[in-house]
Amino acid sequence: MGKKLRVRDGLLPRLREIHRLSSEESQARLMGVSRSTLRRMEAGEQPSADFIVALCDTYGLGLGEAFEISAPRTASLVA
């Protein structure tokens, strides 16, 4: 348990570059989300259903192309 969905590392900046978007604000506007939402997703926060749809729909991506499931980091056991 504790697994979460997150945007693949580096995907949002790569999409900005590929689509020649000048800023996070431009990308957020294109997707119909706020810039703060975009930044939270880049930081690894779990996306909402609306964000998932916006990202996949805007860029024509499948879920597996855009997102990954991450397991929580576990503390190392020291003997």
Image (tube, helix red, strand yellow):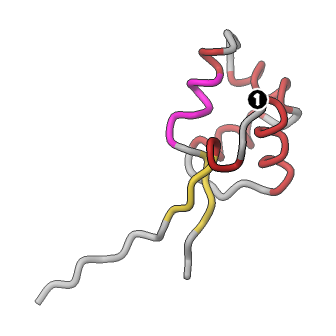
Residue toward you, 68 or 4 = 68
**Residue extent of the magenta highlight:** 9-15
Magenta segment's dominant SS is helix
Instruction: Please determine whether, in this image, residue 40 is positioned above or below residue 60.
Output: below
Residue at the (61%, 54%) spot, across then down: 6
Q: Which residue is mark 1?
A: 59
Position of the C terminus by quadrant: bottom left
Q: Position of residue 50 (x, y in %)?
A: 86, 50
Residue at the (72%, 37%) spot, across then down: 61
Residue 69: in magenta span: no
Residue toward you, 43 or 1 = 1
Q: Amino acid at mark 1?
A: Tyr
Q: Position of residue 15 (x, y in %)?
A: 64, 24
Instruction: Please determine whether, in this image, residue 60 is positioned above or below residue 75.
Output: above
Residue at the (81%, 36%) spot, across then down: 34
Q: Position of residue 26 (x, y in %)?
A: 77, 19
Q: Is residue 54 left or right of residue 39?
A: right
Instruction: Please determine whether, in this image, residue 65 is positioned above or below residue 72.
Output: above
Considering every residue shown, the one lying at the far bottom of the view is 79
